[in-house]
């Protein structure tokens, strides 16, 4: 669904009332405020909506591109919410999970934080970003849940990019399914090779729903290239989706 930013209120899906652990995955890898990262205001809105229906544990989880600690970045972004647990991907136990696709496009197994697997409801919350001409939306946001040091000597998931990141993201979408995606499109951040520096355009929208559907909706509505969506659509045939 598409909302005007001024009208957006997070109404928690009814299934959340039965959850014991809810995991929120923001884009928080850089000590730079929105639209480079997920805003504190959006995180607060989501947490408030969850608290209206459940007292479940709420976890915030992300990692940095260089494998450094993320706790100082959480602090700089103002992620200091009461009764919320903030976690670093690097501090998690990693579990090797098989890609469910019969013929993986690039990665047959992924190392995934165990806390992702043990959570009852998973939410991806990303800003609207266009990097080197391609959209980095709710599905691309899942990449930083993978330990960067495990996928490249210099960090930054080098090994995965060398395989073709669009193929990797397609494999990851099926291996680590999230329940809900939110794209904070109040503004669009456009950059080439400086992840924390670029141009900003006003959009005034919030997209919320299934990750594939909202990434597709953003791509079609705003004319953003996201080649991984075509790959995901083709792979969905295997599951009759």
Image (spheres, grey):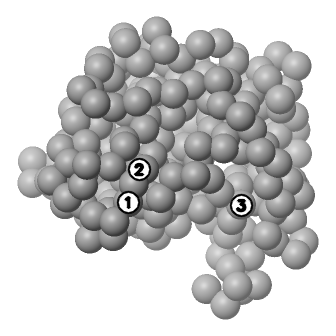
Q: Residue 142 shows which numbered tag? A: none
Q: Is residue 185 left or right of residue 241?
A: left
Q: Residue 19 shows which numbered tag? A: 1
What residue sits right under mark 2 in the picture?
Answer: 22
Q: Residue furthest left?
A: 7
Q: Secondary structure at mark 3?
A: helix
The CA span between labels 2 and 1 is 7 Å
Q: Is residue 156 left or right of residue 187?
A: right
Circles 3 and 2 in contact, beta carbons < 8 Å: no
Query: Observer-nearest residue: 144 or 95?
Result: 95
Where residue 152 appears, x then y in whole percent? 85, 26
Q: Residues within 10 Å of mark 2 (few under 14, many from 20)?
A: many
Residue at 26% x, 26% y: name it: 81
Q: Is residue 232 visible?
A: yes
Q: Is residue 158 visible?
A: no
Q: Secondary structure at mark 1?
A: loop
Q: Quadrant of the C terminus?
A: bottom right
The CA span between labels 3 and 2 is 19 Å
Where residue 25 appears, x then y in whole percent? 47, 41
Residue at 32% x, 58% y: name it: 207
Q: Is residue 153 left or right of residue 9?
A: right
Circle nearer the N terminus (1, 3):
1
The CA span between labels 1 and 3 is 21 Å
Q: Secondary structure at mark 2?
A: strand
Residue at 51% x, 27% y: name it: 87
What residue sits right under mark 3 in the picture?
Answer: 175
Where residue 139 appears, x then y in whole percent? 56, 53
Query: Observer-nearest residue: 171 or 59?
Result: 59
């Amino acid at each position: 669904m598409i909302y005007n930013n001024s009208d957006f209120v997070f109404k928690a899906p009814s299934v959340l009332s039965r959850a014991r652990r809810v995991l929120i995955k923001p884009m928080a890898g850089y000590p730079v405020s929105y639209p480079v990262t997920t805003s504190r205001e959006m995180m607060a809105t989501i947490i408030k909506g969850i608290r209206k229906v459940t007292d479940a544990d709420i976890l915030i989880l992300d990692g940095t591109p260089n494998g450094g600690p993320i706790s100082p970045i959480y602090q700089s972004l103002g992620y200091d919410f009461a009764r919320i647990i903030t976690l670093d991907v690097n501090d998690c136990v990693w579990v090797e999970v098989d890609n469910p696709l019969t013929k993986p496009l690039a990665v047959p197994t992924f190392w995934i934080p165990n806390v992702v697997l043990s959570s009852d409801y998973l939410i991806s919350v990303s800003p609207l970003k266009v990097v080197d001409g391609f959209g980095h939306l709710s599905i691309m946001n899942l990449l930083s849940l993978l330990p960067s040091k495990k996928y490249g000597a210099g960090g930054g998931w080098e090994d995965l990019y060398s395989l073709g990141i669009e193929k990797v993201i397609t494999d990851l979408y099926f291996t680590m399914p999230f329940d809900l995606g939110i794209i904070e499109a109040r503004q669009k951040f456009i950059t080439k090779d400086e992840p924390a520096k670029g141009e900003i355009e006003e959009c005034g929208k919030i997209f919320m729903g299934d990750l594939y559907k909202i990434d597709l909706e953003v791509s079609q509505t705003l004319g953003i290239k996201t080649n991984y969506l075509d790959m995901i659509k083709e792979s969905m045939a295997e599951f009759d989706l």
